[in-house]
């Protein structure tokens, strides 16, 4: 069943580097700059969701394997070879890594498409975005700042206070990332923590670990000292062993709210600092004074790209009643234009969902939406073909409390709701346990800024679907998480504060 992913494109062949990597009988752990095999016989098959073929096999880390990886990362932090390396040298190594990623962009993107199902063009864009993020944080390595402060502490006559605040790397970071953007999200965490002088143990999702393992080998080639970045693979038990270990100095996790709460509870047992980027049910608000054509295209892009498997996807759209029917029809039209095919098909607009299990989950939500009285106005079915494909799906309802409105589906499923006025739209948009992202479509800048102030979300985009940039902090409110990634805030979350006073 190996290398069975030539798919429908008769003239397409993956690169030699990708093929050689995927031919490995079993993929091991990257610990202390070495490939390490576990003694455990437990493995997980990696399946291509476009054609159900098995394209790889990973080892499942035991508690002892996780401990070994943590020991490696902790030792690398404590021996100070990385944290005491000159900032400009850390910057250079991050640039070295970015250079290597650029050289290996094609095979890494091919592997990502094979294991995840996303379009090859999107996979290339994801890798390029990760390269840009490493370069962005490479520049931050030389710009970490503390500050001097004035104290009111009284000293003996002739003596003074010299007080300052010092920023130091927090230590060994446990990094757990999801399957939808495995390279992007790993980079959002690795780049700033490495720039700050921390070390890491990274666990990718067991659904899409291969592209991350390919990336792991580049750290050694780039010149990173042993133990600075360690990568293990496995299941939920492997992750639990990582997040519950008291030697971990910080946990950063991206994934579902349910799992995030479990990890948060484990972290509190050791009082381990934690950053959580969790689920979303992000609203888009389309006012009747917007560029309606652009709004329909933007809303469709925001929910259907990557099969809706995007935490910031605009999965519920509030459309002003005057233009509701027309805008909804245009969104449906955009969805119907999309060509579903294998990620290597250059004509494809939409690839498969990541797995059969996830397809079943999304399909169950569609069924519940219909059973609960929401009107299915477009899509909702899987084509009669091999693979985990699902049509772009649109519901219409007036019930803002409907399950399909309130729960995260994480698929190409949009629910549209009409509204009367701005206050009505904002009330419904904020009536959610999530608060990750949002978008507003209007030509009225005053109205746009009022919505920016009122929306309870970590991100607000005006006249655009949500998109990430290394310099724009990302994170959610309410059940969408704790903390921020990217930007300056994403760097300082991996630094701890030390207050110092010298009496002289």
Image: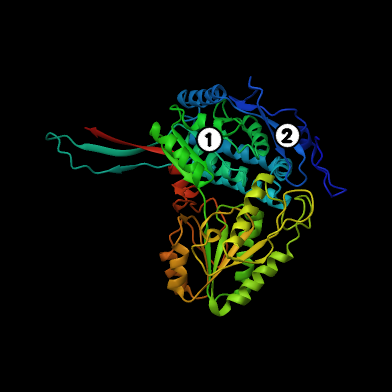
Q: Secondary structure at mark 2?
A: strand
> Which residue matches tag 2?
56
For residue 211, above or below residue 292:
above
Where's residue 440, x and y in %?
A: 52, 67
Relative to 146, is 375 above or below? below
For label 1, the SS is helix
Quadrant (top left/top right/bottom left/bottom right) for the N terminus: top right
Q: Earlier in the sequence, mark 1 or mark 2?
A: 2
Depth check, mark 1 against mark 2: the one in front is 2
In which quadrant will I find the C terminus? top left
Q: Left or right of 493: which side holds 135?
A: right
Q: Residue furthest left?
A: 157
Q: Is residue 352 left or right of residue 422?
A: right
The spot of residue 375 in percent (x, y) is 61, 67
- From where the camera sits, is residue 227 visible? yes
Residue drawn at x 49%, y 23% is 75
At label 1, counting other C-alpha atoms closer than 10 Å, the crowd grade (few under 14, some 14-19, many 20 or more) is many
Residue at position x 63%, y 73% in the image: 293
Q: Which residue is mark 1?
A: 90
């Amino acid at each position: 069943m190996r290398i069975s992913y030539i798919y429908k494109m008769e003239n397409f062949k993956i690169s030699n580097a990708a093929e050689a990597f995927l031919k490995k009988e079993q993929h091991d752990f990257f610990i202390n700059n070495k490939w390490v095999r576990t003694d455990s016989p437990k493995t997980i098959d990696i399946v291509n969701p476009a054609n159900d073929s098995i394209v790889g096999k990973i080892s499942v880390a035991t508690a002892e394997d996780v401990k070994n990886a943590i020991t490696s990362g902790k030792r690398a932090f404590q021996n100070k070879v990385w944290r005491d390396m000159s900032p400009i040298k850390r910057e250079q190594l991050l640039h070295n890594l970015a250079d290597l990623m650029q050289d290996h962009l094609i095979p890494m993107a091919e592997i990502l498409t094979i294991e995840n199902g996303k379009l090859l063009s999107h996979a290339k864009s994801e890798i390029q975005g990760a390269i840009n993020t490493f370069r962005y944080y490479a520049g931050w390595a030389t710009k970490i700042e503390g500050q001097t402060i004035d104290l009111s502490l009284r000293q003996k006559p002739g003596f003074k206070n010299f007080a300052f605040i010092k920023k130091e790397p927090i230590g060994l970071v446990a990094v757990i990332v999801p399957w939808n953007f495995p390279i992007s999200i790993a980079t959002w965490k690795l780049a700033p923590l490495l720039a700050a002088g921390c070390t890491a143990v990274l666990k990718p999702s067991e659904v899409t670990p291969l592209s991350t393992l390919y990336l792991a080998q580049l750290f050694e080639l780039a010149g990173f000292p042993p133990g600075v970045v360690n990568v293990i693979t496995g299941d939920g038990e492997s992750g639990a062993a990582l997040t519950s270990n008291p030697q971990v100095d910080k946990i950063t996790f991206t994934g579902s709210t349910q799992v995030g709460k479990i990890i948060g509870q484990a972290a509190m047992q050791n009082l381990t600092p934690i950053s959580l980027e969790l689920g979303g049910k992000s609203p888009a608000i389309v006012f009747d004074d917007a560029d309606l054509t652009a709004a329909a295209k933007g809303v469709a892009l925001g929910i259907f790209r990557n099969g809706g498997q995007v935490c910031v996807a605009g999965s519920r759209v509030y459309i002003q009643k005057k233009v509701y029917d027309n805008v909804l029809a245009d969104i449906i039209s955009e969805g119907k234009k999309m060509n579903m095919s294998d990620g290597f098909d250059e004509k494809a607009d939409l690839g498969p969902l990541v797995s059969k299990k996830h397809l079943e989950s999304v399909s169950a939500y569609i069924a519940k939406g219909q059973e609960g009285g929401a009107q299915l106005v477009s899509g909702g079915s899987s084509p009669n073909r091999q693979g985990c494909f699902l049509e772009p799906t649109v519901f219409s309802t007036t019930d803002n409390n409907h399950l399909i409105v309130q729960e995260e589906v994480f698929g190409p499923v949009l629910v549209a709701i009409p509204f009367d006025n701005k206050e009505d739209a904002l009330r419904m948009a904020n009536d959610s346990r999530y608060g990750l992202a949002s978008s507003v479509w209007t030509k009225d800048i005053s109205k746009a800024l009022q919505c920016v102030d009122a929306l309870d979300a970590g991100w607000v985009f005006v006249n655009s679907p949500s998109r990430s940039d290394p310099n724009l902090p990302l994170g959610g409110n309410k059940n969408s998480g704790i903390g921020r990634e990217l930007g300056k805030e994403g760097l300082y979350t991996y630094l701890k504060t030390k207050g110092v006073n010298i009496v002289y």
